[in-house]
Amino acid sequence: MDIESISDFFSTHVPEIVLLVGGLVALLIVYSYLKDKSTVRYKAFMALGVLFGALMIFLSVTSYADWNLFVSVVIAVTGFTLVIRPFRDVHFAIIGALLVMVLVYIFLGGLADTALGFLAEGWVRLIAAFIAGAVVYMIMNFAEAIVKLFGKLFNWWPLLLILALICIIESVLMFTGYGSLYDFVTGGK
């Protein structure tokens, strides 16, 4: 086998490879979680899951038109599950709100010589930045709650195990030319 034929193989079998690798990474995460979730191995598998999950999401978003809908959905859901796992307890809303407060405070300082110059001075500038941060916090907190809800569901290890098995079975069926798991469930309709 030469480099060109290997390259052709990988370029024509992208969804199968993504499914197989994603399923194996999910299986490794489940195995190391059940074995001992405080180990470095578990954390390393989670980091690998974040990286590969982001790639899975990117590929499913950019290639969904070329792939079977079921395959795209399985890849996207598994990718989201892998990405969200380590971040399920991080509060991004406060980080985003503080960032917006600082940026608004800086931006308002640049309005000193304009018609809105009153916003660039003293307490008004500070209150406006605080209000902008509070609005961003409310919006991001709501989005964070939605992600946390799905994160709790998708981070349940039995569901991750099921997704891993679906990915692996789907990739094997696609590699062997038997279509999709969806075709087996629906009778090929």
Image (cartoon, helix red, strand yellow):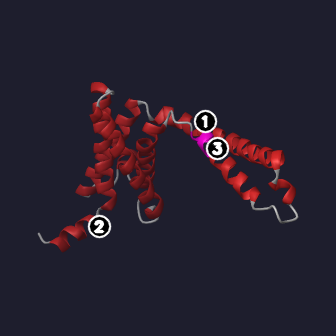
Q: Name the spot of residue 11 as percent of width and height, x first.
A: 29, 67
123 left or right, relative to 47: right
Q: Residue at x 25, y 56 (%)?
A: 175
Specify whether residue 78 is in view: yes
Q: Amino acid at mark 1?
A: Ala
Query: Hey, which quadrant is residue 177 in on the image?
Result: bottom left
Q: Name the spot of residue 108 as percent of width and height, x first.
A: 76, 56
Q: Which mark is residue 145?
A: 1
Residue 96 lies in the magenta-colored region: yes
For disc 1, the neighbor class at 10 Å (few under 14, some 14 to 19, many from 20) is some
Circle 3/circle 2 CB separation < 8 Å: no
132 left or right, relative to 33: right
Q: In this view, which residue lies farthest toward the left?
A: 1
* Labels 3 and 1: the sequence-earlier one: 3
Query: Which SS class for mark 2?
Result: helix
Q: Residue at x 35, y 43 (%)?
A: 47
Q: Amino acid at mark 2?
A: Thr
Q: Which mark is residue 18?
A: none
Q: Which residues are magenta?
A: 92-97
Q: Which mark is residue 12?
A: 2
Q: Which mark is residue 98?
A: 3
For disc 2, the neighbor class at 10 Å (few under 14, some 14 to 19, many from 20) is few
